Amino acid sequence: MDDTLKRLLEAETRAEKIAQDAEQEQERIIQRAMQDARAEDERFTARIPDLHRSFIRKAEERAEQTIAELKRRYDERHVQLRDMAEQREHEALDAAFALLIDPRL
């Protein structure tokens, strides 16, 4: 009976040792995961200025494209209005001359 109790105590001691080792390994894994998460967070935080600059650069490019398009449209409209003004100027001069020549009109 003593041998059986001894073996049971030894088995219980080994089981406790295995459980302690498993808990220690679990704690190491958790600590490593926490370190990895902190490192990833720091890397992301370090990238924020680059991401911000990239966003600003793209926004500026889009703004420049929009400004160029608006300027092109403005120039086209300006030419149209200038052409219409010149056309109306000739019509106005013709009408004024007609009035001067024949005031009955």
Image (cartoon, helix red, strand yellow):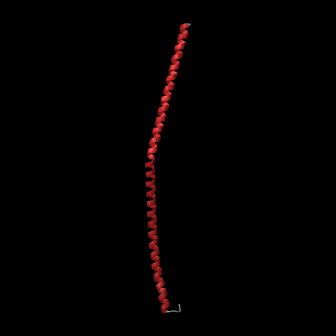
Q: Residue furthest right?
A: 1
- For the image, the number of numbered tags is 0
Residue drawn at (46%, 36%) of the image: 36
x%, y% of residue 87? 46, 79
Classify the position of the N terminus by image quarter: top right
Examine the rendered structure and indicate whether residue 98 appears above or below residue 69.
below
For the point 47% across and 78% down, which residue is it? 85
- Is 98 drawn above or below residue 31 in the view shown? below
Residue at far top of view:
1
Q: Is residue 61 above or below residue 50?
A: below
Name the residue rendered at 48%, 32% in the picture.
31
Compare residues 83 and 34 and report the one nearer the observer: 34
Residue plotted at (53% across, 10% down): 6
Foreground residue, 103 or 7?
7
Residue 102 lies, in percent from the top left, at 50, 92
Q: Is residue 56 above or below residue 92?
A: above
Rendering quarter of residue 56: bottom left
Query: How far across and down, in percent of the image, does residue 74 sit?
Result: 46, 69
Residue 12 position, x and y percent, is 54, 16
3 or 49, which lies in front? Answer: 49
